[in-house]
Amino acid sequence: MSAGKSSDWVRHSAPLLRLRLCANVRASSKERYPAPEKLEIIRLVEQSHLPVRRTLAQIGVPPATFYRWYDLYQPGGPEALENCSPRTGRVRNRIPDL
């Protein structure tokens, strides 16, 4: 399958992502995805005949982000994607208060 056909397949398979793909707009690192879009991305990756990393690269989602969502989705279903709070900021090498 040519690169153009695989890209077309991804584009037509995800209506919620179509605007982002067509405009070649990549999500910024600070942008948060709504739960329905996370679910659409998970379903798109599950149904894709392409490797996971290639599908994610075409839609502009980092693999670590996808697998974090997928780990929440598997045991908890779509409801687990709703209010995912951002990861807590860890301060490394912090000197403890005495």
Image (cartoon, rainbow, N blue to C red):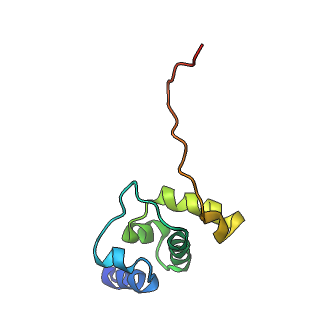
Name which residue lies at 45% across and 65% down: 53
State the residue at coordinates (51%, 39%): 89
Q: Nearer the viewer, residue 55 or 74?
A: 74
Residue 47 in which image quadrant: bottom right
**Residue 1 shows up from this direction:** no
Measured from the top left, where is residue 32 in percent x and y?
A: 46, 60
Q: Residue furthest right?
A: 75
**Horizontal arrangement in the rendering, residue 60 relative to residue 23 (left or right):** right
Q: Residue furthest left?
A: 23
Residue 77 appears in the figure: yes
User: Does residue 14 sit above or below 67 in this rendering?
Assistant: below
Residue at screen point 53% across, 51% down: 86
Residue 51 image offset from top left, x and y in percent? 48, 71
Q: Position of residue 3 (x, y in %)?
A: 32, 79
Picture quadrant of residue 68: bottom right
Quarter of the image that includes the C terminus: top right
Q: Is residue 17 left or right of residue 41?
A: left
Q: Can you say which quadrant of the picture contains the N terminus?
A: bottom left
